[in-house]
Image (cartoon, grey):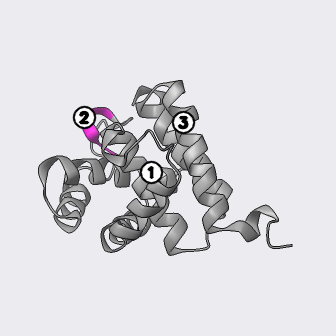
Amino acid sequence: MSQRQNPAGRPRTGARVAAVQALFQSEQTGESAETVADQFIRHRIGAGEGAEGFDEGAVPLAHIPLFEAILRAAATGAEAGDAEIRAHLNKDWTLERLDPVLRAVLRAAAAELLAAKDPPARVVINEYLDVVRGFLDEDTARFANGVLDAMAHALRPQEFGAAQ
């Protein structure tokens, strides 16, 4: 993730990057989110000697409580999160058809949007779009923006003036 060479001062972004990586790893290996979270905390999170970026899956700076909260919410609310994502995909798309990294991003974002009212939905959207742009191309970022925006409006309409 070369675009993010200096994550200093953004531990919450680091937590989201790590959560996406962990959800991806969990899906690819079949390991539980708890097992992967433990591996990340022990081996990937934190600035090791010479750690300046996100090389080789390292996350030099991450807010561990947020990382754990996102993974916990994604694991315990997997069914609701996936249903929410499916509800906002074009009828020609399935969750399984999505790029696995994009699927992990959408699952992490859905978990945050479903689990808490803080941070604001716009912050969640922007943070995960930054993550998408770090891993995927701009067309995928536009696609993700549409899905994230639709999910946020559906789950938190009051933040967008719909409740007024």
Q: Which residue is mark 3?
A: 143
When the figure is inspected, residue 49 is found, relative to residue 148, above or below; the finding is above
Image-based side of 3 in relation to 51, left or right: right
Q: Where does the N terminus fall, quadrant-wise?
A: top left
Q: Residue at x 38, y 35 (%)?
A: 53
Q: Point out the stretch of residues depicted in magenta.
A: 55-59
- How many callouts does the rendering have? 3
- Amino acid type, callout 2: Glu
Q: Is residue 86 magenta?
A: no
Residue 139: x and y, percent? 53, 26
Image-based side of 35 in relation to 84, left or right: left
Instruction: Provide the secondary structure element on which disc 3 rests.
Output: helix
Instruction: Provide the secondary structure element on which disc 1 rests.
Output: helix
Residue 131: x and y, percent? 47, 41
Residue 106: x and y, percent? 44, 51
When the figure is inspected, residue 16 is found, relative to residue 94, above or below; the finding is below
- Amino acid type, callout 3: Phe
